[in-house]
Image (cartoon, rainbow, N blue to C red):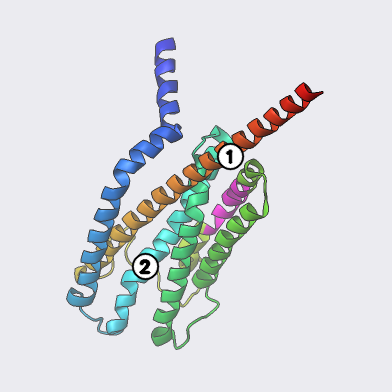
Amino acid sequence: MKTKDATSQSWTQRLANPTRFMRLSGIVLPWLTAVAVAVIGYGLYLTFFVAPPDYQQGETVKIMFIHVPAAWLAMMGYLIIAISSFGLLVFRHPLADVSAKAAAPIGAAFTLLALITGSLWGKPMWGTYWVWDARLTSVLILFFLYLGLMALRSSLDDEALAAKQTAVLGLAGVVILPIIKFSVDWWNTLHQPASVVKLDGPAIHSSILVPLMVNAVGFSLLFFALHLKAMRNEVLRRRVKAMRMAEVNEAAHNQDAAAATAV
């Protein structure tokens, strides 16, 4: 039993080791980036040269190939923050706060992209760029949650306190995700209901579905590549900060020692 516990603990420690993360992510990141670029390139080719115009929406349906993946990733980004926040508060995982901090600006960017493309898509369909629809309003709240997390973190000088405060807010805000997902079912909205992720299968033709899913995979890979890169930058930033603090403390200690010797 002791051997098994020791092995389990060793594996957990290896997973939580920032040095190991930097080494593995350094190997994975270039390949992940290359695959993301290739898949997105193929998805955009399908979007503009293969996918047919919709019989009702015409060419404007192609906004969907950007809007839908962006909306999915807006929600996934916040889910990553919530899971990372849980990992920090419950398990004290050393990379949990790094993951949450790195995901916030990326998730905010995809949320803004979803709002912008949704507005552009809404103009020819609804006759206006914006309505206070349940789905649109809840996604806007999600965007403000992202901004709130980043603002709260930047307003606190104590990184440990900032990590805990943003983790609490991140977990509390996760309630917005089911509201976004089921808003079209709970309320009478202009936004169309789910047409891809359904129990009885997708409700759109394969000529539209295939390019949509290729773009979704490509943008998801891009999200993970950006997240890994941002996490690596944050780990390096914290290491540099720790080294500077160590130098400052050593200089102060040497100065105190010199003053004591002089006396």
* Left or right of 256 on screen, residue 21: left
Q: Quadrant of residue 141?
A: bottom right
Q: Is residue 69 left or right of residue 191?
A: left
Asked if residue 58 lies left or right of residue 159, the reply is left
How many numbered marks does the figure carry? Answer: 2
The earlier-in-sequence mark between 2 and 1 is 2
Residue at figure coordinates x 51%, y 55% from the top left: 104
Q: Position of residue 143 (x, y in %)?
A: 54, 65
Q: Which mark is residue 68?
A: 2
Residue 29 sits above or below residue 4 on the image: below
- Amino acid type of the residue tagged 1 in the rendering: Arg
In terms of depth relative to the viewer, which is nearer, 23 or 82?
A: 23
Residue 5 lies, in percent from the top left, at 44, 16
The residue that label 1 is drawn on is 244
Q: Residue at x 36, y 64 (%)?
A: 69
Residue 115 visible? The answer is yes
Q: Is residue 82 left or right of residue 191?
A: right
User: Label 2 sits on what residue type?
Assistant: Val
Q: Is residue 169 magenta?
A: yes
SS of the residue at dot 1? helix
* Span colored in magenta: 166-176
Q: Residues within 10 Å of mark 1 (few under 14, many from 20)?
A: few
Q: Which residue sits furthest bottom?
A: 127
Residue lying at the far right of the rendered structure = 263
